[in-house]
Image (cartoon, helix red, strand yellow):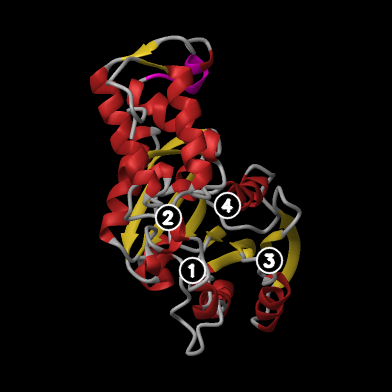
Amino acid sequence: MIQRRNERPTVWTVQELLQWTADYFQRLGLPSARLDAEVLLAEALGKRRIELYTGYHMLVEPEERARFRAFVERRARREPVAYITGRREFYSLSFEVSPAVLVPRPETEHVVDAALARLKAPRPEGSASGPRRALDLGTGSGCIAVAIAANAPEVEVDAVDLSPEALAVARRNAEAHGVAARVRLHEGDLFAAVPPGAGPHEVIASNPPYISAAEYERLMDDVRLHEPRAALLDLKSPASDGLGSYRVIAAEAPARLEPGGLLAVEVGMGQAAAVRAILVAAGLVLGETLRDYGGIERVVTALRRP
């Protein structure tokens, strides 16, 4: 892949490798060809991306090229870059990721924004005493739970996931960011995994599976072929309409929240109105709906009545 046609093996510079790889990725139809090439080459060289710009003419050693070639071949098979490097930044924190968990996305940062806005504000009058508590349903890599704990040092977080492999990743992320003592991990399905004495919670946050069966077949290969199906596909509604998890969460949230407590859920494109209706039908009071960086309604919030 690195050797030029009709040419003997030769030395390659950083600039030459980046250009060749970006062109190759573009021919494959990868949407962020240049960025992917830079991230993977930096990983292969053990450098930061910024160092590539200051070292364009640096020669790349054969063993480094071999490592880079393996990364490029994996990306050509549509494996997400985050799984190749094993890392993804989320909320200005570096998270370990693996095929056991979804790759954290910028859109999900708005769930953390909503949770922190509540948890950093003065506690409402009449609220429960004791430590402030948050619950993360479907924690995956732990990105929501860990980001909340790292940015709100007085908050204790319960984090739930069905997958023991995902919880192992979340545990390592909590330890890496020094919040393991305040992030309690529980294996199981949504509220069923929360120990009886763990609540009520001031905030419940979730990025649940919200892809319908019809939408799942149209997902990009990067997602459909590599990211965990159970974390993407709605399996809680008979028709798999993408709304099953919201119905389950809404039904139990009023009893699981403190009076006046906040529920914040990420939703898929075009789902916000339907999710708001589900929350209102469950007796919750609608709060703000947050838009993502693309202007799409992405996080719906609601409150338990005081």
Give residue 209's mark.
Answer: 1
Instruction: Check the image and name the residue furthest to the left.
Output: 63
Spatial CA span between label 1 and label 3: 22 Å
Spatial CA span between label 3 and label 4: 19 Å
Main secondary structure of the magenta stretch: helix
Number of marks in the image? 4
Answer yes or no: do the residues labelled 2 and 1 have beta carbons within 8 Å?
no
Spatial CA span between label 1 and label 4: 13 Å
Answer yes or no: do the residues labelled 3 and 2 have beta carbons within 8 Å?
no
Residue lying at 55% horizontally and 39% vertically, measured from the top left? 91
Task: Tell me the magenta residue range.
Answer: 47-52
Answer yes or no: do the residues labelled 3 and 4 have beta carbons within 8 Å?
no
Between residue 218 and residue 103, name the one nearer to us.
218
Residue marked by disc 4? 108
Give the mark nearest the N terminus, 1 or 3.
Answer: 1
Q: Secondary structure at mark 2?
A: loop
Give the mark nearest the N terminus, 4 or 2.
Answer: 2
| Kind of residue sitting beneath label 2 | Leu
Query: Mark 4 or mark 2: which is in front?
Result: 2
Residue lying at 50% horizontally and 83% vertically, measured from the top left? 240
Spatial CA span between label 4 and label 2: 11 Å
Inspect the magenta stretch and tell me whether residue 130 lies in it: no
Give residue 303's mark.
Answer: 3
Give the mark nearest the N terminus, 3 or 2.
Answer: 2
